[in-house]
Amino acid sequence: MKIKHKQVHPLKFIKSPKALIYNGLLFVIILASLGCSSDGRMTTFESFGPVAEVQGLLFDVLIWVMAIVFVLVEFVLIYAAIKYRHKPGAPLPKQTHGNTALEITWTIIPTILVLGLGMWSLQVLWQIQEPPKGSEPLEIVATGHQWWFEFNYPDAANGKAITTANELKIPVNRPVSLILRSDDVIHSFWVPKLAGKQDMVPTRNNPLWFMAEEEGYYYGQCAEYCGTQHALMKMAVKAVSEEEYLAWVEGYGEKPYLSEEAQQGQQVFNGKGQCITCHTSSGPDSEALVQARVNGFLSGAAIAAGPNLTDLATRDKFAAGIYDRTSENLKDWITNPNELKSGNYMYKLAQIYKTEDGVANLTESEIEALVEYLQSLK
Ligand code: CUA
């Protein structure tokens, strides 16, 4: 039997060149828009400290070198494919084999590029392992929880220990040395304007350091899928002047002024609300207390490590950086946290939410007093 060969144009599947261009453009626009955000809060293209700067420079050079290589190679490939494609009736082209000069060139250039960029990458990797020698980094232990961040300062200043959550206050222009941990699943600590990602892995202590060179907020987010509220596991690094930082440390844990309503709120916090089971509101959490809460949770008790609220009223947001700390939002949160952040452990565990409609078993005035108390914690 004779097989009949039919000449098929290699780009036949594209109906018209116009369609190809339009579809290609659409694809590029969709891809590009995925990386867009109106405020650039989490952009990786802006660096505000030594760690992010060397990482950013390495990234920029790598991407440009790769882009140029890609364009050159694709150009030659497409040019050759079009120019030398088989035409009906054309004779067999001249057969050649080997071209020493060409082969040496296309071996040497990529080798230099790969080795050069590889060695530079390694050098950057080593360079950002530890804060510069002689600097006095601020030590902080960051722990990932489902779905919020805990920050422990063993010595925030003058030997004072601090536990806080979701908003990491640091002095500007001082290296910060973090130990990253997790007490449940794997999370990832990521503040793109200050440093690249680092995983928070149970039973491990992963180091990460950075330094903010300008005052302001640097937004971050858990970058490792960790369950229901992974996408809303946010936080912020707030870099402030040395004086402002020291004032915050000084004030931390000092008895706050409580209005009459706030005092009633405190009673609800410690009593009917049972908030105190999981949240501390009067100073740092000791290792033992944290461990007791974790152990209680693992044994099935209605207890878990909850964000330390001692300095809540100095933070701009709450619920892992997703809501502004307004009294109205706090009220909604206490009334039914599941509506604002579904799956959270406060809602799952706390007795006051074991109601028919899931709304807190507290009176409106009790909730208002509780909000007043929380708003006094600074
Ligand atoms: Cu924690 Cu994702």
Image: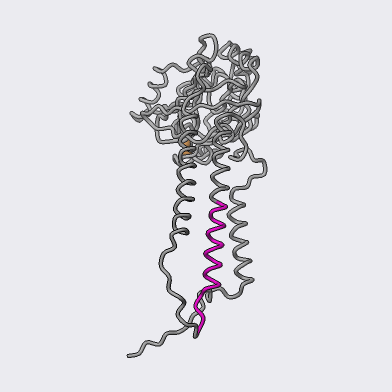
Q: Position of residue 139 (x, y in %)?
A: 49, 19
Residue 48 location, quadrant: top right
Instruction: Give the colouring mode of the picture.
Output: one colour
Q: Which residue lies most toward the front here?
A: 101
Residue at horizontal 65 percent and vertical 31 percent from the top? 328
Magenta stretch encompasses residue 72: yes
> Can you say which quadrant of the picture contains the C terminus?
top right
Looking at the rendering, the stretch of residues picked out in magenta corresponds to: 67-88
Compare residues 361 and 66 and report the one nearer the observer. Answer: 66
Secondary structure mostly taken by the magenta-highlighted segment of the chain = helix
Q: Position of residue 57 (x, y in %)?
A: 58, 38
Residue 21 location, quadrant: bottom right
Q: Is residue 203 visible?
A: yes
Q: Position of residue 377 (x, y in %)?
A: 60, 18
Compare residues 314 and 279 and report the one nearer the observer. Answer: 314
Compare residues 57 and 276 and report the one nearer the observer. Answer: 57
User: Where 38 falls versus 55 (above or below)?
Assistant: below
Residue at horizontal 54 percent and vertical 36 percent from the top? 55
